[in-house]
Amino acid sequence: MRKIIISKNASGKFNAGAIVLLAACLAISALLLCVKAQAADSENAPIYKDQNAPIEKRVDALIGLLTLEEKISMIHGDVGAGTSMDTKAIPRLGIPRFQMSDGPNGVRWGASTAFPPGITMASTWNEDLLYRYGVALGRETLAKGRNMILGPCVNIHRVPFGGRNFESYSEDPFLAARIAVGYIKGVQSQNVVATVKHFAMNNQEIDRGTVSVETDERTMQEIYLPQFKAAIQEAGSYSVMCSYNKINGIYACENHHLLTDILKNDWGFKGFVVSDWGAVHSTIPTAMSGMDIEMPNGAFTGKDLLKAVQDGKVPVSVIDDKVRRILRVMITTGLYDHKINVDVTWFDSAESRLVALDLAREGIVLLKNKGGILPLDKKKIKKIAVIGPNAKFSVVGGGGSSEITPLHTDTPLEGILKQAPIGTEVNFALGCDLLMPVEYEIVPTIYLTPAGDMAGDSGLFAEYFNSVTPAGKPVASIVEKQIDFNWGGSSPIEGINKDSFSARWTGKLVPPTSGEYKFVVVSNSVAQLFINGKLKVNYWANDSGKGKIATVNLKAGEEYKIRFEYQNMGRGASAQLGWQRPGVSPMNDAAKLAKESDVAIVFAGIDKRLEGEGHDRDSLEIPGLQNELIKKIVAANPNTIVVLQNGTPLIMKEWLDKVPALVEAWYPGQEGGRAIAEILFGDVNPSGRLSITMPNSWEESPAFGNYPGKNLKVNYSDGIFIGYRYYDAKGIEPVFPFGFGLSYTDFKYSDLKISPEKMGADGKKITVSLNVKNTGARAGKEVVQLYVSDIKSSAPRPIRELKGIRKIYIEPGESKNVTFDLDQSALSFFDPKKNKWVAEPGAFEIEAGSSSRDIKVKGAFTLQ
């Protein structure tokens, strides 16, 4: 080491410059020693900690250090974590947990941004927008302390009233694939694990845990698997969730053909398979099938699997493969090395709210606009009647595990009030309830007096309890005006549980007139109505939110003791007490308002009580008195616009030909009120297109006759002919075809070119190009849809199949050239005899248009 000499000056003191030099030299020396020490540590560190080492070598090293018991603990959920959504961590080796959250329409971990659900997303036909959504979703997932989102849901719409259709995308696998790819790439760009689900053939909720889907290999490969394949091979999804149902008699989560032969071997999937919650039914068959993580616990893959391995019935190599897949994802995403950046401001951010708004804007579909009644002329419209049960509430999505509790919402009525120009009068009338087959109103405050010493107050005395029954001392008491509550997943009052709570309202009721009153109780759980101590309504959760009615004769001016008790036993808490008064008709009141207005807007549809996980809808009919309401309103005012909010098709034949305008808003998420209003007033030009076919009836559906199934089996004898493929093959004219949607402008297609006109067997692509011109007066977005037809085939094939999508923005008078590249995969069908995809030589037709039934230009080429 070099010597450093510090000299003194003439006064005998040390030279200041020398001291500075000494300090600098000591600092440099310390730094060099530190660097050397770190280098030595790096050289001596185990390879699994070396972030520069190949991932597979790091995984090998970790597997070599894990005990068999630790490996087993990693391949099922850890209920000891205090949640049913986490896996087991191994602290001694730095192996973290997967911390999951339900999706796919937002982060279901407390209140979050409620994005529009899958049916609305798919109706945007915009893969780039779905990437933006994925980024926002990934960031909110991290901000919530989670690192794995259980979405997207890509199951095909086979049954038109499937309970979870609103969560998933389409009847068409190509469209579903494009939406899923954008979603997954966006989520995983934030190093959050996406989980594509439910693999596979989970196309109904009735008997979903026991039903066996009986299908052939071609149907499965062509219709029900392509979107999963794209999620793996294009988007690189890190995780796949196996479904509840059986496929050809074998549960999905122990289906070797599905999970190993197809997913892992044919598609090259390197991630892991997680079970749906409670979808595992065996130990050894499940372990040997390719399922990797059982959730929410180790009922079958815990101690029973450990013993099976110890007894030699399951090879250790099988367990190692599962652990390898888990560790590979942990290292690839940076989770293992703590590389994931988290910013809590991502939660409920302005960008998340804008993405939710843009999804709603682009997902809303204009289905009818006779006489150009839309957009509403802000200069001419001075009085607007807003009517209907879905106008005053935010119907953000369906029910079940995808249900999101938003921090805030924007109702359609609020959106219209905000969007309407100053000086425009906007009035609201309920008209009828969403579900109930009788007209009623919430019992008005003026006829209610609270129990106890509440002189001068109106309403009812409310007591809230942190118990499932209203007994003992209440936690909170308050006077409330009416019983008209939709708490969702939130606490009803400070200090009360979000889920398990109860309430009791007491007081006196003084009716205004004598006669027969129909009391209506609507709830999500258990509710009871007592009048003068006698039980009049006994409502239970399995009544599906449709409500119950009790007829009671009351005398004007008399006092009646009233008691209403409510017990909440789960999520989505709600309670309503209404009545139908003698001689009073809310529907007639709404019609009167409509007649006095320049335009009437009726908001109708369904909500999460009818549409959600665990059950399918009973029918395609619009429930309650909504059909009668629409007919009465349009009779009072021919300038009536109907806005539907729903996740599956609705039968509209009773009034469709009578109303001039129809808007399909689906479930538009938390920003839906604003988005709907922007469409109605023309601030946004509608660009949504149907991702499903709107049928005339259930009987004309391809699944009719093969649903829900007999002897716990459902036969997919409809094969590859579902959705528009079926309607085309049968020559059936649906109400609205797949891909349909109107705009406030017009587009002209021309100059279709195919180059080259012959595709060789060398696998090279052909390019299809065409021009699209905006011939109207407004800027707008057009969805160019490319369909392929095999003119002559050895196997039955659809008349046309969607194989290309482009959503483009065009200014008035502007033309844009649109191109598509097609390879042989776009021309192929699955040949079960050869067990591979085949493109047969011959003539093919290309069709481009704005829906499956609105073909604008055509061309042909030959596959040699």
Image (tube, rainbow, N blue to C red):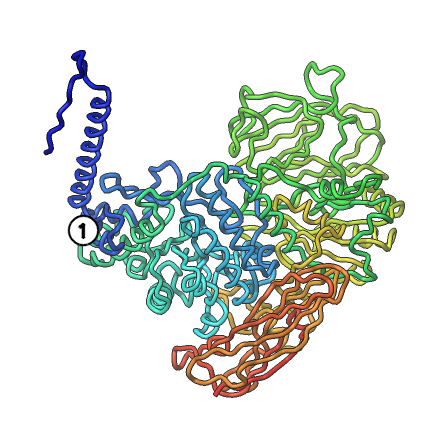
Between residue 674 and residue 659, name the one nearer to us: 674
Q: Amino acid at mark 1?
A: Gly
Residue 567 to residue 862: above or below: above
Between residue 643 and residue 200, name the one nearer to us: 643
Count numbered badges in the picture.
Answer: 1
Q: Residue at x 28, y 60 (%)?
A: 288
Between residue 226 and residue 27, name the one nearer to us: 27
Residue 468 to residue 117: above or below: above
Label 1, secondary structure: give it: helix
Packing grade of label 1 (10 A; few <14, some 14-19, many >=20) is: few
In the shown orientation, is residue 613 left or right of residue 816?
left
In the orientation shown, which residue stands out farthest toward the front?
10
Provide the residue designation for mark 1: 64
Residue 571 to residue 823: above or below: above
Q: Residue at x 40, y 39 (%)?
A: 83
In the shown orientation, is residue 40 left or right of residue 141?
left
Expressed as whole percent of the image width and height from the top left, the position of residue 76 reads: 32, 48
Residue 319 to residue 835: above or below: above
In the shown orientation, is residue 389 left or right of residue 272?
right
Expressed as whole percent of the image width and height from the top left, the position of residue 520 reads: 71, 39
Expressed as whole percent of the image width and height from the top left, the position of residue 615 reads: 55, 53
Q: Is residue 56 visible?
A: yes
Expressed as whole percent of the image width and height from the top left, the position of residue 188 reads: 43, 52
Q: Residue at x 59, y 43 (%)?
A: 353
In the orientation shown, which residue stands out farthest toward the right?
596
Quarter that holds the N terminus: top left
Q: Is residue 654 visible?
A: no
Between residue 392 and residue 19, name the one nearer to us: 19
